Amino acid sequence: MHPAGQQSGSSDRPTETLLADTPPQADLSHVTQTRALVSSYVGMLGIAVAVNTPPMCLTALTDTFLLTDTQRGVLLGALFWGFVAAIVCTGPLGDRFGYKPFLVLASCLQISGLVLSATAQSYPALVTGAAVLGVGCGVLEVLVSPLVCVLRPHARTRAMNLCHGFYSVGAIGTLALSMHLLRLHVSWRLIYLVMTAPVFLYGLGFLTCRLPRPERQNTNLASVLPWNERVFWRMLLAMLFLAGAEIGPHQWMSAYLEEVFRFARETAGSGLVLFAIMMALGRFAMGSLPAKYVPLRVLLLNCVGSAVCIALAGTTHSRVVAVASFACLGWFVSAFWPTVLAHCADRIPNGGITMFGALSAVGNSGGIVFPTMVGWLADHRDLRSGMLSLAAVPLAAGVVFVWELWETRGGGNPAT
């Protein structure tokens, strides 16, 4: 909180007073910065809970509500409807009013979404719960990434990959716990309620922690978003395809292994667990990448690797090859999201929360389009065809990265 004597003489001070804004990152103590980072890490666990619980319970939900493949695709995409809606609104508001009120709101919305889903008695109610859960996740996601960049301005790529690595850690925990509870024949409704625990913890952490101000405090989209930066438009396009390469296979993986390869329900999540483990390893590895490596070149190689893994999973008749392909896919997609965000933060350092929000909104749109596309193809052809169709998505992202590398003449940005 700024002393009263410092709050006069500026037209922006009433906003700071209302929100108990704190000093810039450089003036925060090491302990305060660490608490903010830890709360951000736990927040990523909360996003992992939201994204991984529905796929693990998908076949149980199908039995309860007698869902078609298209309905299942819509349900999986509903989470990302909420993501996109929240991200579009939160970016400008976060730039203006700061982090804390919206981070606490995110926790409340996620808990509400999980409870609504757990108590749903109809398919529309279930979709509504997923959308509310997605709104909470979207608010959280669009704020955590710029917050970490403010707290670690000289090590953005490393800090972003480390932070997003905790998403993968949370995914592993969520999947392992869900598999164990399903093995014990625990209802999917109770599983949803159990998953509120980490969401409550990160909300409490942000509520009791001082946070820095955003790098920009502006509500004018025309001036906040870098419309004239070609790299911004390229990365928007890349985010759409990268999200499809990651979220599309992820959301259908458990059902795919159960229905195509006849895994038992309680073991069908094994592919998701291995996917999450490899994603965690990949993000921590990318965070420690030596500065001599150009991140975009690494991402280009990962795009090719992702396409190969999805193609193998969609064509093989071997259980082992399918699970191994999904595991390797986790490694290849691991660096996509955080590294693109860090690349934009390096190229456009004053983009603010709104820039991160635009990138995340477009990325999460891929979470709507591609899982729904798989469900539609599964209804009209089969689930294997739906999965195989996703192999083209990372290749499209690779074309965008070639374009970006060409524009920068291969200079890129070193991992900072």
Image: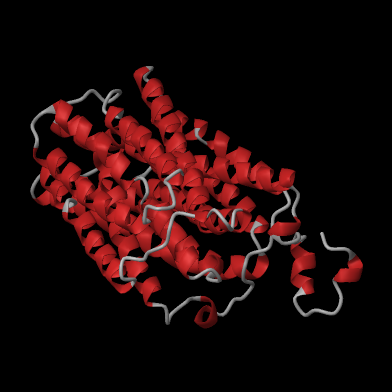
| Residue lying at 63% horizontally and 64% vertically, measured from the top left | 214
Image x and y of residue 333, in percent: 31, 47
In the image, 87 versus 3, the foreground residue is: 3
Which residue lies most toward the top here? 184
Q: Quadrant of residue 372?
A: bottom left
Give above or below for 63 relative to 351: above
| Residue lying at 36% horizontally and 19% vertically, measured from the top left | 185
In the image, 406 versus 229, the foreground residue is: 406
Image x and y of residue 325, in percent: 20, 36
Which residue lies most toward the right here? 5
Q: Quadrant of residue 250?
A: top left
The image quadrant where one finds the N terminus is bottom right
| Residue lying at 10% horizontally and 51% vertically, measured from the top left | 380
Which residue lies most toward the front here? 292
Q: Quadrant of residue 121?
A: top left
Q: Is 197 placed left or right of 315 in the picture?
A: right
Image x and y of residue 407, in percent: 31, 73
Query: Can residue 367 be spotted in the picture?
Result: yes
Q: Is 374 placed left or right of 90 in the picture?
A: left
Image x and y of residue 257, in percent: 20, 32
In the image, 324 versus 115, the foreground residue is: 324
Q: Is 387 placed left or right of 75 in the picture?
A: left
Give above or below for 262 relative to 91: above
Query: Can residue 208 be spotted in the picture?
Result: no
Give above or below for 18 relative to 289: below
Give above or below for 200 relative to 356: above
